[in-house]
Amino acid sequence: MNKGLIIYIAVIVCGWAVIIALNWIFTVIPPWLIALGVIGSTVVIIAVDGFAAHLCHVAQPRMDPFSKFFNVTKRQKVILTKLGVKKLKNYLPDLGGFVKFKKGKIVDPKSKEYVYAYIMESCSGELGHIFGAIFGFLILLIFPPWVPLFSGYWLTLTLPVACVNFVLCLLPPLALRYNRHALTQIYQRLDQRSKAVKTGS
Protein backbone atom coordinates (compact mmCIF):
# COMPACT_ATOMS: atom_id res chain seq x y z
CA MET A 1 0.00 0.00 0.00
CA ASN A 2 1.53 3.32 -1.07
CA LYS A 3 2.00 6.24 1.30
CA GLY A 4 -0.56 8.41 -0.44
CA LEU A 5 -3.30 5.79 -0.08
CA ILE A 6 -2.53 5.39 3.63
CA ILE A 7 -2.84 9.17 4.09
CA TYR A 8 -6.14 9.22 2.19
CA ILE A 9 -7.56 6.41 4.33
CA ALA A 10 -6.38 8.22 7.47
CA VAL A 11 -8.12 11.43 6.33
CA ILE A 12 -11.34 9.53 5.64
CA VAL A 13 -11.28 7.81 9.05
CA CYS A 14 -10.56 11.13 10.79
CA GLY A 15 -13.44 12.65 8.84
CA TRP A 16 -15.68 9.85 10.07
CA ALA A 17 -14.62 10.47 13.66
CA VAL A 18 -15.30 14.22 13.45
CA ILE A 19 -18.69 13.86 11.74
CA ILE A 20 -19.85 11.09 14.09
CA ALA A 21 -18.65 12.96 17.18
CA LEU A 22 -20.32 16.25 16.22
CA ASN A 23 -23.58 14.49 15.39
CA TRP A 24 -23.48 12.55 18.64
CA ILE A 25 -22.96 15.76 20.63
CA PHE A 26 -25.18 18.25 18.81
CA THR A 27 -28.00 16.22 17.24
CA VAL A 28 -30.66 13.80 18.43
CA ILE A 29 -29.94 11.30 15.64
CA PRO A 30 -29.61 7.77 17.09
CA PRO A 31 -25.92 6.69 17.36
CA TRP A 32 -26.48 3.62 15.17
CA LEU A 33 -27.99 5.79 12.43
CA ILE A 34 -25.08 8.25 12.66
CA ALA A 35 -22.53 5.48 12.10
CA LEU A 36 -24.64 3.81 9.40
CA GLY A 37 -25.21 7.10 7.60
CA VAL A 38 -21.56 8.16 7.58
CA ILE A 39 -20.02 4.79 6.74
CA GLY A 40 -22.79 3.87 4.30
CA SER A 41 -22.44 7.22 2.52
CA THR A 42 -18.70 6.66 2.21
CA VAL A 43 -19.16 3.21 0.67
CA VAL A 44 -21.66 4.58 -1.84
CA ILE A 45 -19.49 7.56 -2.72
CA ILE A 46 -16.45 5.34 -3.31
CA ALA A 47 -18.58 3.28 -5.70
CA VAL A 48 -19.66 6.48 -7.49
CA ASP A 49 -16.03 7.64 -7.74
CA GLY A 50 -14.97 4.27 -9.12
CA PHE A 51 -17.78 4.23 -11.68
CA ALA A 52 -16.91 7.77 -12.85
CA ALA A 53 -13.25 6.81 -13.18
CA HIS A 54 -14.16 3.68 -15.16
CA LEU A 55 -16.38 5.58 -17.58
CA CYS A 56 -13.66 8.16 -18.23
CA HIS A 57 -11.08 5.43 -18.78
CA VAL A 58 -13.37 3.68 -21.28
CA ALA A 59 -13.97 7.01 -23.07
CA GLN A 60 -10.22 7.71 -23.22
CA PRO A 61 -9.84 6.98 -26.99
CA ARG A 62 -12.29 9.82 -27.73
CA MET A 63 -10.31 12.39 -25.78
CA ASP A 64 -7.97 14.91 -27.33
CA PRO A 65 -5.10 15.33 -24.83
CA PHE A 66 -3.92 18.46 -26.64
CA SER A 67 -7.27 20.25 -26.54
CA LYS A 68 -7.67 23.58 -24.78
CA PHE A 69 -9.32 21.91 -21.78
CA PHE A 70 -6.41 19.55 -21.08
CA ASN A 71 -3.67 21.98 -22.09
CA VAL A 72 -1.52 23.19 -19.18
CA THR A 73 0.08 26.56 -19.88
CA LYS A 74 3.33 27.75 -18.39
CA ARG A 75 1.38 30.24 -16.27
CA GLN A 76 -0.79 27.45 -14.86
CA LYS A 77 2.34 25.45 -14.04
CA VAL A 78 3.76 28.44 -12.15
CA ILE A 79 0.51 28.84 -10.19
CA LEU A 80 0.42 25.13 -9.34
CA THR A 81 4.03 25.32 -8.19
CA LYS A 82 3.25 28.29 -5.93
CA LEU A 83 0.32 26.33 -4.49
CA GLY A 84 2.76 23.63 -3.41
CA VAL A 85 1.45 20.96 -5.78
CA LYS A 86 5.01 19.71 -6.39
CA LYS A 87 5.16 18.56 -2.76
CA LEU A 88 1.47 17.72 -2.47
CA LYS A 89 1.59 15.16 -5.27
CA ASN A 90 3.96 13.03 -3.19
CA TYR A 91 1.19 12.54 -0.63
CA LEU A 92 -1.55 11.56 -3.07
CA PRO A 93 -2.44 7.92 -3.82
CA ASP A 94 -1.44 6.40 -7.15
CA LEU A 95 -4.41 4.30 -8.21
CA GLY A 96 -3.03 3.69 -11.67
CA GLY A 97 -2.57 0.05 -10.75
CA PHE A 98 -6.30 -0.47 -11.30
CA VAL A 99 -5.80 0.25 -15.01
CA LYS A 100 -2.31 -1.30 -15.09
CA PHE A 101 -0.62 2.05 -15.58
CA LYS A 102 1.04 3.49 -12.50
CA LYS A 103 1.76 7.20 -12.63
CA GLY A 104 4.19 7.52 -9.74
CA LYS A 105 7.07 8.16 -12.11
CA ILE A 106 7.94 8.27 -15.80
CA VAL A 107 9.30 4.80 -16.53
CA ASP A 108 10.33 5.28 -20.17
CA PRO A 109 10.78 8.99 -21.05
CA LYS A 110 12.44 8.09 -24.36
CA SER A 111 9.42 6.24 -25.70
CA LYS A 112 6.99 8.43 -27.63
CA GLU A 113 4.24 5.81 -27.33
CA TYR A 114 4.71 5.44 -23.58
CA VAL A 115 4.68 9.21 -22.94
CA TYR A 116 1.56 9.60 -25.06
CA ALA A 117 -0.15 6.80 -23.12
CA TYR A 118 0.88 8.52 -19.88
CA ILE A 119 -0.67 11.79 -21.08
CA MET A 120 -3.89 10.00 -22.01
CA GLU A 121 -4.07 8.33 -18.59
CA SER A 122 -3.47 11.73 -17.02
CA CYS A 123 -6.37 13.27 -18.94
CA SER A 124 -8.85 10.48 -18.24
CA GLY A 125 -7.76 10.43 -14.60
CA GLU A 126 -8.35 14.16 -14.28
CA LEU A 127 -11.85 13.90 -15.73
CA GLY A 128 -12.65 10.89 -13.57
CA HIS A 129 -11.75 12.76 -10.39
CA ILE A 130 -13.69 15.87 -11.43
CA PHE A 131 -16.82 13.86 -12.18
CA GLY A 132 -16.35 11.93 -8.94
CA ALA A 133 -16.21 15.19 -7.00
CA ILE A 134 -19.43 16.44 -8.63
CA PHE A 135 -21.49 13.25 -8.73
CA GLY A 136 -20.43 12.40 -5.20
CA PHE A 137 -23.21 14.72 -4.03
CA LEU A 138 -25.69 12.12 -5.32
CA ILE A 139 -25.27 10.45 -1.93
CA LEU A 140 -27.59 13.14 -0.57
CA LEU A 141 -30.30 10.87 -1.98
CA ILE A 142 -29.55 8.45 0.87
CA PHE A 143 -31.22 10.90 3.23
CA PRO A 144 -33.26 13.08 0.83
CA PRO A 145 -34.04 16.48 2.38
CA TRP A 146 -37.55 16.51 0.89
CA VAL A 147 -38.59 13.48 2.99
CA PRO A 148 -39.82 14.65 6.45
CA LEU A 149 -38.48 11.50 8.13
CA PHE A 150 -34.92 12.38 7.01
CA SER A 151 -35.22 16.13 7.60
CA GLY A 152 -31.87 17.39 8.86
CA TYR A 153 -30.03 14.09 8.45
CA TRP A 154 -28.62 14.98 5.03
CA LEU A 155 -27.23 18.25 6.40
CA THR A 156 -25.19 16.65 9.19
CA LEU A 157 -24.49 13.17 7.78
CA THR A 158 -24.27 12.81 4.01
CA LEU A 159 -23.45 16.42 3.07
CA PRO A 160 -20.22 16.50 5.16
CA VAL A 161 -19.14 13.19 3.59
CA ALA A 162 -19.83 14.58 0.11
CA CYS A 163 -17.82 17.72 0.93
CA VAL A 164 -14.84 15.66 2.13
CA ASN A 165 -15.04 13.60 -1.08
CA PHE A 166 -15.23 16.81 -3.13
CA VAL A 167 -11.96 18.09 -1.65
CA LEU A 168 -10.16 14.74 -1.89
CA CYS A 169 -11.28 14.27 -5.51
CA LEU A 170 -10.07 17.69 -6.63
CA LEU A 171 -6.52 17.29 -5.29
CA PRO A 172 -5.33 14.61 -7.79
CA PRO A 173 -6.29 16.69 -10.87
CA LEU A 174 -3.93 19.41 -9.63
CA ALA A 175 -1.07 16.92 -9.49
CA LEU A 176 -2.01 15.41 -12.86
CA ARG A 177 -2.02 18.83 -14.52
CA TYR A 178 1.28 19.72 -12.87
CA ASN A 179 2.90 16.58 -14.29
CA ARG A 180 1.20 16.87 -17.67
CA HIS A 181 2.98 20.14 -18.44
CA ALA A 182 6.33 18.34 -18.44
CA LEU A 183 4.92 15.24 -20.14
CA THR A 184 3.56 17.32 -23.03
CA GLN A 185 6.93 19.00 -23.53
CA ILE A 186 8.68 15.62 -23.54
CA TYR A 187 6.17 14.25 -26.04
CA GLN A 188 6.55 17.25 -28.35
CA ARG A 189 10.34 16.83 -28.39
CA LEU A 190 10.03 13.11 -29.11
CA ASP A 191 7.46 13.80 -31.82
CA GLN A 192 9.68 16.40 -33.51
CA ARG A 193 12.65 14.04 -33.33
CA SER A 194 10.58 11.23 -34.82
CA LYS A 195 9.42 13.45 -37.70
CA ALA A 196 12.97 14.65 -38.29
CA VAL A 197 14.19 11.04 -38.54
CA LYS A 198 11.43 10.16 -41.02
CA THR A 199 12.17 13.25 -43.11
CA GLY A 200 15.88 12.46 -43.12
CA SER A 201 15.24 8.95 -44.27
Image: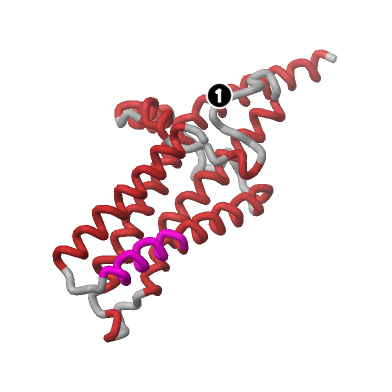
Furthest residue toward bottom? 148
Residue underneath mark 1:
185
Q: Taking 129 as reference, is 102 above or below it?
A: above
Q: Taking 63 as reference, is 87 above or below it?
A: above
- Mark 1 is surrounded, within 10 Å at the Cα level, by few (under 14), some (14 to 19) or many (20 or more) other residues, namely few
- Secondary structure of the residue carrying numbered label 1: helix
Q: In which quarter of the view is residue 113 placed?
A: top right
Task: Find out whether residue 146 is within the magenta segment.
Answer: no
Q: Quadrant of the C terminus?
A: top right
Residues rendered magenta in the picture: 31-43
Residue at 62% in and 26% down: 187
Furthest residue toward left? 26
Q: In which quarter of the view is residue 9 placed?
A: top left
Residue at 54% in and 57% down: 52
Q: How many marks?
A: 1
> What x and y, as percent, mark residue 64?
61, 44
In the image, 73 versus 108, the foreground residue is 108
Q: Of the residues shown, which amino acid type is indicated by label 1?
A: Gln
| Horizontal side of residue 60 vs 178, given as left or right | right
> What x and y, as percent, mark residue 172?
44, 40
Residue at 81% in and 13% down: 200
In the image, 181 versus 160, the foreground residue is 160
> What x and y, as percent, mark residue 139?
40, 67
Furthest residue toward front? 32
Q: In which quarter of the view is residue 10 placed?
A: top left
| Horizontal side of residue 77 vs 2, given as left or right | left
| Horizontal side of residue 170 vs 66, given as left or right | left
Residue at 23% in and 75% down: 152
Furthest residue toward right? 201
> What x and y, as percent, mark residue 102?
60, 34
In the image, 123 versus 7, the foreground residue is 7
Main structural element of the magenta stretch: helix, strand or loop? helix
